[in-house]
Amino acid sequence: MRILRAVIRREYLQRVKSRWFLVSTFAAPILFIGITVVPILLESGRQEARRNIGLVDETGVLGWRVEPRLEEAGFTVELAAPGSEDSLRAQTLDGKLGGYMVLDNESLFRGHSTFYGEQGPGAIRIMTMRGAVVQSALEARLAELGAEVDVEALFGGGSLDLELLADSQGGASEDEPEFIGVFAGAMLLYMVVLMYAAAVMRSALEEKTGRIVEILISSVRPWELMLGKIIGVGSVGLTQLGVWILCGTLALTLGVPALAGARPDLADPAAIAQGLPSMEMVGLFIALFLGGFFLYASLYAAVGAMCSTEEEAQQAQFPVVFLLVAPILLLMPIMQEPHATWATVMSMVPFFSPVLLYARVGAGEIPLWQIGASLTFLYLGVLGGAWVAGRIYRVGILMQGKRPTLPELWRWVREA
């Protein structure tokens, strides 16, 4: 165990202290915040006066409906009487107002309105203004008919409650799936597993081609070297994910309130909170990442051990890459039918479950026994993959020359 800990420590510190790790870990979140949040905040400072607008209501029924909707979107609205356009025009030219809107009969019947200003309010704010006018016009027209309708709910897309008529459950409800968050989480799983598992292959290949492994094997057994590489690189991956999660948490707790205060039209804290994954999903993500990483890292370690050049490794890793790409091709169909029999079976396959199980759980209410069975098969696959890869690694790490054929690999597994 002392030797194994030394290998893990070496693999971990060698990568954590590298310049590339520091850049990819800390510069990536900073760059993302820089290109998304900073321009919005800078632009909001320059557009402070442009959020002050005048509102002229010639219909007599729309102004008091449009005003609160615009103020909720971050505007400061000054209701003006019809005929005061000259005064509003002068204030706009003096920079006291960002512009003014005029509501007329066309606004009431067609949702059409006119904005006057020295420059446009921006595409997002134009959509906000149009939406406020259309909702208010529809609400006013329905009020004339004596109909009480929740216009906000209708324009929000409505909602759909599902009652599952299952004998075993006696009925269950299911929330609308957050497809964007689930898809992003599944893709993130694919990328981090591929990135860090491939790092194990490159590490084994570098030591083999540089003849360093011949010195290491004199004091370290092959299985200890392979396991140390896998755990060390996996720890690096967890460290980087932890930093990213911490940065994301800080950005949400500190940045979103500031962004909502500066640009309410772009940030809805309630909507953002609803789109965030739950703690259960975060725990499932970590469990799937660990299982998927150890499984694919073992296979990549075997690929690195049996190849002698970078070109050979690029060709030999194709079957492993295919196993990772296949669930990505099934991602959208499985999110649309998470309860289908084929979806359940595919999420039980260890090579596919790191991506597909997360997608199924996020897209629908999955029985706990299916989650437990999928995780069990995944970690059993880790043990089986590590056993096979360890035997290939034991023989191949010291082999030079031509890449072995499939019969030769099978002989290594049997005789190692």
Image: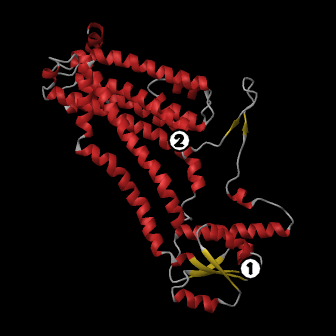
Determine the residue positioned at 21% across, 29% down: 205
Of the 4 image quadrants, the one containing the N terminus is top left
Disc 2 to disc 1, C-alpha distance: 45 Å
On the image, the x and y values in percent for residue 342 come to 57, 26
Please name the residue that numbered disc 1 is placed on.
Answer: 105
In the image, taking residue 72 as reference, residue 329 lies left or right, namely left
Q: Is mark 2 on a helix, strand or loop?
A: helix
In the figure, 247 relative to 357: above or below? Answer: below
Furthest-top residue in this view: 415
User: Which of pointers 2 and 1 lies earlier in the amino acid sequence?
Assistant: 1
Q: Which mark is residue 182?
A: 2
Q: Is residue 300 visible?
A: no
User: In front of the other: label 2 or label 1?
Assistant: 2
**Hey, which quadrant is residue 86 in on the image?**
bottom right
Q: What residue type is labelled 2?
A: Val
Q: Residue 230 carries which label?
A: none
On the image, the x and y values in percent for residue 415 come to 26, 7
**Hey, which quadrant is residue 414 in on the image?**
top left
Q: Which amino acid does label 1 sit on?
A: Asn
Front position in the image: 6 or 80: 6
